[in-house]
Image: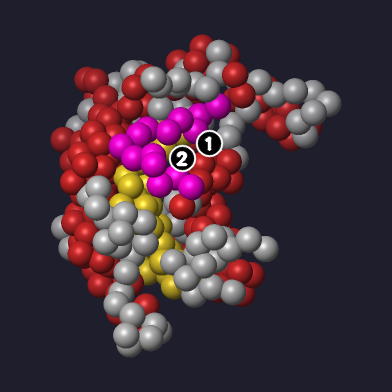
Amino acid sequence: MSRPLQGKLAIVTGASRGIGAAIAKNLASKGCNLVINYTSSSSTELANSLAEDFSKAYNIQAVAVQADIGTPNGPSALIAAARDHFSSSSPTDKPFQIDILINNAGVARNALLENVTVADFEETYRVNVLGPLLLVQAAQRYLPTDRSGRIVNISSVSSSTGFVTQSVYGGTKAALEAMTRTWARELAERATVNAVNPGPVEGPMYASNSPEFLEGIRGWIMHTPLMKAREGVDSEEVVQEAREHGGRMARTAEIAGVVGMLCSDEAGWCTGQVVCANGGMVMLH
């Protein structure tokens, strides 16, 4: 088995389920040690189970750490917990280093313009924008000094598509992409910094969308090259899913594959980019 990330350490936020868990698995399969971050106590058992499973399956070190990225002290607490755990398990002559940082944790509060509340605005921006900013701040001193570090921010097609009801969510993802470009310049001697912008992906976040929202994006789905299900090629489950949702959703592993690529040595000449992982729903230039 190829282990190109052998001995490296990655922190993945919102990693107890969905895209975050798939990213953690992808990195673990390549030999990367992991900090699996989660927010709610209800996810403790699941996050610990993933850490144990990945450790056994891929012969790595993995630890689950509860920290709310959307609070002022959550990001620094996450970095401190990672440092404490991996410093104690590493040789004393090897300084603690964060090689990969994945800003995946996020929330969505969809509402028409007239129904947007200050509370929803503040919570969404705290988790989706302030959280990644504070986390990168806390991690900065521990990034590599040879440009080998990798930071990947999970954005969304919503940053550029203007979907109805996503004034706030789309705005947070646009902000995250703007910060991606700034960090790519400011951290150039430490790490590459890129964003990935999924479209519809299997999982609870997409399943929570209202019928009205799904109807509103139907036209986008119909014109997305890779969302067309193919009878006789795709599984019956995928074909049926496409009938119900208007098109084939991405698998979390497919998004994780793009993120994993950006974390590789081969991606060292790619920085400040929004890399499309949405089946062609958005094609940036």
Residue type indicated by callout 1: Val
User: Circles 1 and 2: CB distance less than 8 Å?
Assistant: yes
Residue positioned 24% across, 52% down in the render: 189
Residue 108: % across, % down: 35, 37
Residue found at x 54% / y 73%: 60
Q: Quadrant of residue 216?
A: top left
Q: Which mark is residue 205?
A: 2
Which mark's residue is nearer the viewer, 1 or 2? 1
Amino acid, disc 2: Met
Report helix, strand or loop for mark 1: loop
Examine the image and state in which quarter residue 69 appears.
bottom left
Q: Which one is nearer the viewer's eye here, 194 or 213?
A: 194
Q: Residue furthest right?
A: 232
Which residue was labeled with disc 1?
A: 201
User: Residue 124 at x, y = what percent?
Assistant: 26, 41
Label 2 crowd (10 A; few <14 / some 14-19 / many >=20): few
